[in-house]
């Protein structure tokens, strides 16, 4: 590990510097925003890729389930890793579901499938449950709910 | 003249993140390829990087080409559409 003159590892030092810089920029930005009306400048893309698929959420949810299944057989170190990875995957499930919910599904889909809002709400809540607990049942229920969404998604694609 | 703007959108990632502030200087010097500029197009101010300059026009691109609508779709812009050069933060395109 490369060390700086004061003995602190260089990587930690530069991480701290980046953190300090981000904090200062944030404070500066807040102060400036309160003093000046700041107009937006668009780094825009008006061509969304239009690629949506519940499979993304399902793959992450499968990881959550597999981790839950293996959890008890792991040693302490790998249990710790498993919990971190499971939580990351469950968070990704939420992200992919939100993208589908907010970007793919349109009002006409809701008219045809009025349960959509409730279904997404229950599924993202279930992703939270699977994140907080290591139970196989929670992970399996999450997969089942994603499959319900996938069925509706498939139907809208065929329509 | 100094301009302060807040970035909306992902087309200039990774150097310019959505929500961050930028400072621009109204043009006082000649434009150069590689500079990040604020251009006015379709009634909106947009942030892009100059990829090519020719007499009277600039060809601008986003740093994040997968998520950018730029000269690849709207073509060359007149030099007069360049409002300012971004002076802070200074980001060189990588990769």
Image (cartoon, coloured by chain):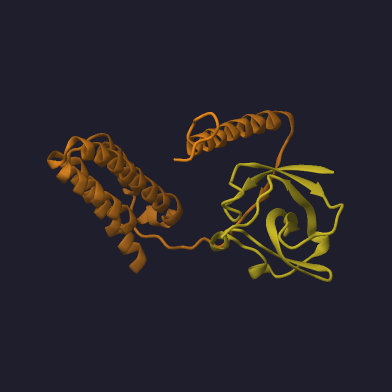
Chain colours: A orange, B yellow
Q: Quadrant of the C terminus of chain A?
A: bottom left
- In the visual, does A126 lie left or right of B61? left
- In the visual, does B94 lie left or right of B28? left
Q: Residue at x 31, y 43 (%)?
A: A90
Residue A12 image point, x, y percent: 48, 35
Q: Residue furthest right?
A: B28
Taking depth in this image into account, of A124 and A1 the one nearest to the observer is A1
Residue B76 showing in the rendered view:
yes
Q: Quadrant of residue A46?
A: bottom right
Residue A50 image point, x, y percent: 46, 63
Q: Residue at x 62, y 30 (%)?
A: A24
- In the visual, does B46 lie left or right of A120? right
Q: Residue at x 65, y 54 (%)?
A: B92
- In the visual, does B37 lie left or right of A119? right
Q: Indicate whether A155 appears above or below A128.
A: below
Q: Residue furthest front?
A: A5
Q: Residue at x 53, y 35 (%)?
A: A4
Residue A159 showing in the rendered view:
no
Q: Quadrant of residue A30?
A: top right
Residue A127 image point, x, y percent: 29, 42
Q: Quadrant of the N terminus of chain A?
A: top left
Label total for image: 0
Q: Indicate whether B4 appears above or below B60.
A: above
Q: Quadrant of residue B54?
A: bottom right
Residue A81 image point, x, y percent: 27, 40
Taking depth in this image into account, of A115 and A55 the one nearest to the observer is A55
């Amino acid at each position: 590990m490369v060390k700086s003159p004061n003995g602190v590892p260089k990587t930690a030092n530069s991480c701290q510097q980046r953190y300090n810089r981000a904090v200062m920029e944030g404070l500066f930005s807040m102060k400036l925003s309160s003093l000046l009306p700041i107009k937006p400048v668009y780094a825009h893309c008006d061509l969304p890729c239009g690629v949506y698929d519940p499979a993304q959420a399902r793959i992450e949810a499968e990881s959550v389930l597999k981790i839950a299944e293996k959890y008890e057989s792991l040693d302490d170190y790998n249990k710790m890793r498993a919990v971190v990875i499971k939580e990351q995957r469950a968070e990704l499930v939420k992200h992919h579901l939100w993208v589908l919910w907010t970007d793919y599904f349109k009002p006409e889909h809701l008219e045809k499938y009025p349960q959509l809002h409730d279904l997404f709400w229950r599924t993202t809540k279930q992703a939270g449950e699977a994140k907080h607990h290591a139970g196989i049942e929670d992970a399996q229920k999450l997969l089942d709910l994603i499959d319900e969404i996938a069925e509706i998604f498939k139907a809208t694609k065929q329509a | 003249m100094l301009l302060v703007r807040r970035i909306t959108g992902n087309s200039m990632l990774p150097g310019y993140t959505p929500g961050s502030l930028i400072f621009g200087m109204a043009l006082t010097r000649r434009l150069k390829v590689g500079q990040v500029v604020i251009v006015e197009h379709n009634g909106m101010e947009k942030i892009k990087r100059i990829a090519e300059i020719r007499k009277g026009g600039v060809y601008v691109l986003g740093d994040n080409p997968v998520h950018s609508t730029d000269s690849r779709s709207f073509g060359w812009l007149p030099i007069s559409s360049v409002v300012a050069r971004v002076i802070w933060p200074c980001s060189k395109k990588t990769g």
